Amino acid sequence: MERIEHHASLGGRQEVWQHASTTLGCPMRFGVYLPPAALRGERCPVLYWLSGLTCTEQNFITKAGVQQHAAQHGLIVIAPDTSPRDPDGTLGVANDPAYDLGQGAGFYLDATQSPWAAHFRMESYVVQELPALVETHFPATAQRSLSGHSMGGHGALTLAMRHPGRYASVSAFSPIVAPSQVPWGQKAFAAYLGEDRSAWAAHDAVALIAHAAERLPLLVDQGEADDFLATQLRPELLQAACAAAGHPLTLRLHPGYDHSYYFIASFIGEHVAWHAQALRARLL
């Protein structure tokens, strides 16, 4: 691995690392915030953050203000890129000119369809390869939590449900809760997974809720002034699915807030505190 950025921040250090991903078959970057406790040599639990469409590892670490909260609670924060990348066009990583498919739009699943299947394996990367690197190269424990925004909120919810016991807690901002029922998800799922909708259901939070093996409480924040609320996000579908299944959900709707990082920055401290409490409970 190669460290390509490092900045002092709130008594800790914000870094960006690059490594050759064997899962994705290309170089990948991820942000790492090391709180003061980690710099003192203490092993710290880890919050993984999954960003949304068009984002890289940079958006969250530069816009959300997460560092002050992670420093306070002693959490390492990991923010990976959102897809495999091929900036030079030499690795054969598939792409599409649209913003909502291809590079920058990995949807946190393992694609099964050509030409995507060769590199688009973001579920395996986030759940397996990345934590193995983090827990080997940084003072990180194996206690993990998961959060994300929009496409990354979809990823957080579905990966937590698809891998019961692996995460202490999960939360999301403005998640795509029912990708099988909205244009963003339908486009991506048809390309990455094919036309079999039973394969789609395995990566759809609303569909997964009914059979979730673990009743991990969900914390979801959604802005009511979000331009994508009615067409792409549909939080009422998650609310109905959780009510039908008896799955614990805290859904908070915020008047005036949109889809931007101004919204995330306003409530990220509460999410970090939520995860810190759950991670501490795992250690008891």
Image (cartoon, rainbow, N blue to C red):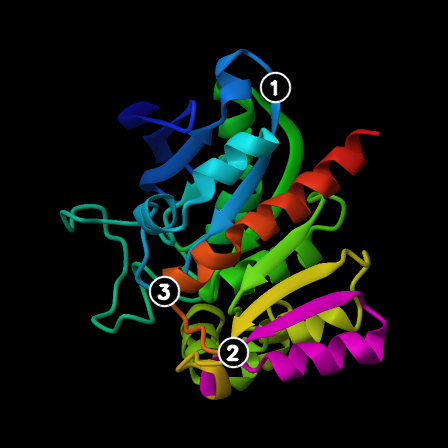
Q: Label 1 sits on what residue type?
A: Arg
| Location of residue 262 with respect to 7 vertically, above or below | below
Badge 3: residue crowd in 10 Å (few <14, some 14–19, many ≥20): many
Q: Label 2 sits on what residue type?
A: Pro
Residue behind mark 2:
255
Residue at the limit of the structure toward the left, as seen here? 88
In the rendered image, is residue 129 in sight?
A: no
Residue behind mark 3:
53
Quarter occupied by residue 6? top left
Disc number placed over residue 43 in the picture, else none: 1
Residues drawn in magenta:
231-254
**What secondary structure is marked by label 1?**
loop
Quadrant placement of the N terminus: top left
Instruction: Tell me if label 2 and label 3 are in contact, CB under 8 Å.
Output: no
**What secondary structure is marked by label 3?**
loop
Tell me which residue sits at (53%, 36%) in the image. 70
The tag earlier along the polypeptide, 2 or 3, is: 3
On the picture, is 52 further left or further right than 222? left
Position of residue 230 measured from the top left corner of the image (x, y, whole percent): 49, 88
Residue at the limit of the structure toward the bottom, as seen here? 230
Badge 2: residue crowd in 10 Å (few <14, some 14–19, many ≥20): few
Tell me which residue sits at (44%, 37%) in the image. 67
Position of residue 45 measured from the top left corner of the image (x, y, whole percent): 62, 30
Q: Is residue 234 magenta?
A: yes
Q: Is residue 23 magenta?
A: no
The tag earlier along the polypeptide, 3 or 1, is: 1
| Location of residue 133 with respect to 281 vertically, above or below | above
Q: Label 3 sits on what residue type?
A: Leu
The tag earlier along the polypeptide, 1 or 2, is: 1
Q: Distance between the residues labelled 3 and 1?
A: 32 Å
